[in-house]
Image (cartoon, rainbow, N blue to C red):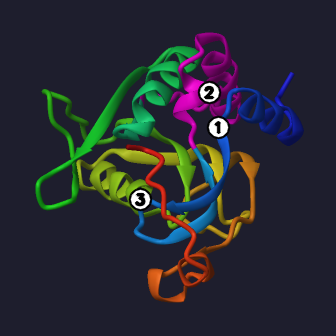
Amino acid sequence: MPLTADQVQAILRDCGSLLEGHFLLTSGRHSNRFILLAQALQHPAQAERLCRALAEPFQGQAVETVIGPAVGGIILAFEVARALGARGIFAEKTAEGRMALRRGFALRRGERVLVVEDAVSTGGSVSQVIELVRAAGALALGVSVIADRTGGKLKLGLPLHTLLALDIASWNAEECPLCRAGVPLARPKD
């Protein structure tokens, strides 16, 4: 039985993944809410439940490889791959800030690939992974994410499956009301 958005939110809340305050996002933007999915993914039973739900819409699509951007996508790629009977790999940022396959990972022409991510705000890392898959000549079948911070507004040009869509505000540093109010900025991934 698929997980509902309410069940996903309850899992994340119980694991301490839903935070409130003043946060610096990976994109450089600021927000008053943060989803720290590593807190949920440290619990194998919860990680397995979430990843099975990420895999469900792609059952029967002959997924050969599941790939996620490091660091958030490493556990997800492994667990979703296990649920789909595929292999799980990850892409890493280069010194120039672009995603690349390293550690001997490779994709072949025509390989059927699912992209996974823990949370998306702008979709920057996921878009780079999709470009990487396509540059290798592999077929990107879709994207599956636990949390979409755009409330469903994100467009990636592929089928997008999200377990939880939250419309969470974010601002450029110059426009951030929390900065203007003097609220200290936190880097939750540190």
Mark closest to the chain's N terminus, 2 or 1 = 1
Q: Hey, what amino acid is under mark 3? A: Thr
Is 182 located above or below residue 132 in the figure?
Answer: below
Q: Residue at x 56, y 48 (%)?
A: 119
Task: In the rendered structure, find residue 26 and report the number of the disc placed on it.
Answer: 3
Q: Does residue 129 appear left or right of residue 106 in this picture?
A: right
Mark 2: give few (<14), some (14-19) or many (20+) Cα within 10 Å: many
Task: In the rendered structure, find residue 88 and report the number of the disc placed on it.
Answer: none
Instruction: Compare residues 145 and 133 and report the one nearer the observer.
Output: 145
Q: In the rendered structure, are the residues bearing label 2 and label 3 in contact, judged by CB atoms less than 8 Å apart?
A: no
Q: Examine the structure image and report whether residue 52 is included in the region drawn in magenta.
A: yes
Q: Is mark 1 on a helix, strand or loop?
A: loop
Mark closest to the chain's N terminus, 1 or 3 = 1
Res. 6 in view = yes
Q: Mark 1 points at which residue?
A: 17
Q: Does residue 20 appear left or right of residue 70 in this picture?
A: right
Q: Does residue 146 appear left or right of residue 67 in this picture?
A: right
Q: Examine the structure image and report whether residue 136 is included in the region drawn in magenta.
A: no
Q: Quadrant of residue 145?
A: top right
Q: In the rendered structure, are the residues bearing label 2 and label 1 in contact, judged by CB atoms less than 8 Å apart?
A: yes
Q: Hey, what amino acid is under mark 2? A: Ala
Mark 3: give few (<14), some (14-19) or many (20+) Cα within 10 Å: some
Task: In the rendered structure, find residue 40 and report the number of the disc placed on it.
Answer: 2
Q: Which residue is drawn at 70% across and 65% down?
A: 168
Magenta range is 36-65
